[in-house]
Structures are given as C-alpha cells and as structure tokens.
Amino acid sequence: MLEAIAEAKRCLHCKVPQCRKGCPISNDIPEWIHELSMGNLGNAMAIINAKSNLPAVCGRVCAHERQCEGNCVLGKNGEHISIGKLERFVSDFDSSMNLIRENLVPKTRGRVAVIGSGPAGLTVAGELARKGVAVEIFEMEREAGGVLMFGIPEYRLPKDVVRKEIKKIEELGVTIHYNVTIGHNYTIDDLFAQGFDAIFMGTGTGKPKKLEIPGGDLYGVRQAIYFLRRVSLWREGHVGREEVAVREGDRVMVIGCGNTAMDAARTAVRLGASEVTVVYHRTINEMSALRAEYDDAVAEGVKFRWNSSITEIHHTAGVLNEVVVETDGVAAVEPLDKVIMAVGNAPASRIVSTTHGIEVDEKGYVRTRETPYGMTTRKGVFAGGDVTNRPATVVHAMQDARKVAEGMMQYISAVKLLEAIDAESSVNDNI
C-alpha cells in the first residue's frame, strides 16, 4: 500500500488532465488518485465505480500506453504515473476487503434483457441496474464473462478477478441465466413476450474469419479464438488436455499481429511449444498489438516474421507437416506442426436470422441508430460492442455500452411516459 500511495503522490493534478482525455470512458483519474494519495481507498473506489463497471479488468488489460498513461504529462520525461497498476491495486484491495458495496436501487423503471455477458453486456447491465432498471442477462456459456473469461489468457487476466467483477454486477440486482442461447432456446420475440421493455444485444463476434489458402482446413489449423477458449476450458477443468491443439514440442506459427495473436503466441509458449513464430504481412510499425505485448512476447521467445505470409499449408496423410512462407516476394518451404489464425472475427447470425426487423450491413454487423443511441432497426432492440463493429478493445466496448445504456434509458422513459398518458386518457374517457 505504501508503494501505491507514494506513486499516487507523484500526480501533478493538472488543471486540464490529459490522462482523463485519453481514457475512453473519461475516468476521473486525478480525483481517485488524489484520494488514494491520502489513503482514502474507499473514496477512490467510489470515484472509479462512477465511470467503470469493470475496474479490476481495465487495470489489467486496457491499452494504458496509448490512453491514460500515454497522455500523462510526466510521460514526456519517461516517468508517467502508473495509472493501470494503481487502478488494479485499488480494485483488488476493494474486492479483498469489501470496502465498497453500493446501495441497491429499487427496480421500478422497467425491465431489460441483456444478451451476452462480455464487457458490453456487463457494462449495460451495471449502468441500467444503477438507474433502477430490472436487468436479466442471458448467457449461452456455463459461466459469465465472454471474452474476459474465454478469450484473454489467465496470465493477463486471472479468471477469479473476472468472477469478482461479475459478482459486483450481480450485487446491483442483476440476474444471470446460464446455458441459454438466444436464437435457439428463445427468440427476441419470446423475450418481449416475457414482458421486457427493451433488449440489448452484446453478443460480440464469435465467428472467426478464415484465410482462403490451400490447406487452410487441415486439422492442424486452428482459429485463435477457438484455441484460447479451449485452453481456458482446460485450465478450468472442463475439458481434457487432448482438447488443446498445441502439444509440447510443437512448432507453431501464428498468422496476424493484433493483441489476440500475441495472446495465442504467448499461450503456445506456455503450453510447451518448441518454437513459436508470428507471421505478419506488414511491418512492426503497422501491427495493431500493443508495443508492450510485443515486447513481452519477444522476451518469452516468440519470433516475428515481418512482410511475410503463409501461402500454402502442406500435409502428409492429413497431418500438417510444413508450410510455404513468402517473405518480401521470396517463398520457402518450412517444417511446422500447427497454424493458429488470428485474423479477426465476424458476428454470428443466430439472433438476426430468427428475428424480424434487425438489419445488418454487408459484413453482418448490426446497424444501429444515433437517436436513441444504439437502437437497431427494430424498435426496442439495442446493440453495442463488437457486434456493431465499433469497439476494438475491452474499454472501447465499455465506452460504447455506456452510451447505449443512456439511449436505452431514453427509450424506456419515453415508452413509460406514453403508457402513462394513454392510461390517464383511458380513465378520463370512462368518466
């Protein structure tokens, strides 16, 4: 604690805080850091909670170097405040000591169904619950968290941290239904028939994109999102080790150079791969991964091939054994055991295909309105997060979801007002 307080005391409390401007959710960073500097951890947590529903997560996986820390004026001297570590410290201390437990707001302002419990869904649920809305989350998995639980490795985001954050959301009065798939068990129409005033789609992009290259459908080729999910399930004891594609001693290549590619590569190292190489068709300056993630991957032994592409994948009797890698126009055949593709994902069509009136663009992303923000082309159905192709990170999904929650409150309030007017008119007509 003394170390955290000492770090907090370095804050200059700028008149125009650039760190706050750099935060996608406009976290009141100088205010809570000031409280921390005086040892007031409860006050610091309360300030953080006002803007963030997942502070312990943000403290670990946010792109601090591009956001708050990257805008800190002390960074000009290479000594920016360690905002991410401080947020993580305050959040973890709060969880372990039960410092902050918010008052439960009476749920009198309507009912909302939230589909999906990833960053966007949890944020919408938390925001609306605090405003007096009864929220029920419908999650297709056996556990909540979405990408936080199944897409980000344990070493970056411990699952117990995610569980504690979800518990805080539940303590706001939010109910979570597990193993329920909307579009299969229920449709959007079914949810409206159950009496929900509005519905939020926070289903993310669970359908991996593929590269159409010879051999791309071989058994030894895995999508990064599938690979990371299987690793998570194995570590939680839900599947056997044989369900995880990478074996000890495997030679692995990862296609792509975003944060998911870094996660896949570093996870492969931890699984005992003898050699892990990231293959990227552009340069290091064009990668979307954080530089810190790249540096950590290099430190762990991951190799990188720039201006390179895998053009063919070969096999013997159906078993992947080599690939053709083209670098700066020169092709070479190289021995290999596994290929992991981290080239992006697209939305699944399960909900849209079973619901009338929700339009999507040519790539399958859900179209939404600006007023009320986040509403789809079907009245009362809202969407946010990756399914709308807006966010790129956890905190950006949260930023978008907070705006959608505001739009949903506007919609619900308007509907309730019209219902009250109609009810009063009906009474007057009968007098």
Image (tube, rainbow, N blue to C red):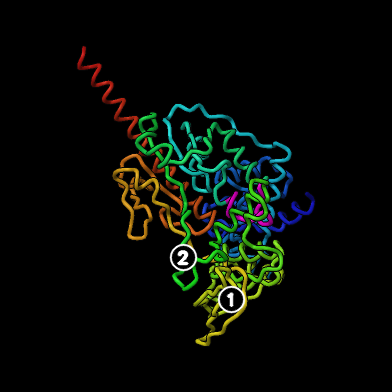
Q: Is residue 115 left or right of residue 27?
A: left
The picture places residue 283, in percent across and down from the top left corner, at 54, 78
Report the residue at 73% width, 46% height from top: 38
Residue 251, above or below 179: below
Please tell me the numbered disc located at residue 210.
2
Q: Which residue position holds label 1?
A: 322
* Amino acid type of the residue tagged 1 in the rendering: Glu
| 300 inside magenta stretch | no
**How many residues crowd around disc 1 within 10 Å: few (fewer than 14), some, or many (20 or more)?**
some
Residue at the extreme front: 317
Report the residue at 69% width, 65% height from top: 269
Give whichever of 422, 254 is nearer the camera: 254
Give whichever of 58, 24 is nearer the camera: 58
Our reading of the magenta stretch's main secondary structure is loop
The picture places residue 390, in percent across and down from the top left corner, at 43, 57
The picture places residue 117, in percent across and down from the top left corner, at 52, 44
Residue at the extreme top: 431
Dividing the picture into quadrants, the one containing residue 413 is: top left
Q: Which residues are magenta?
A: 148-159
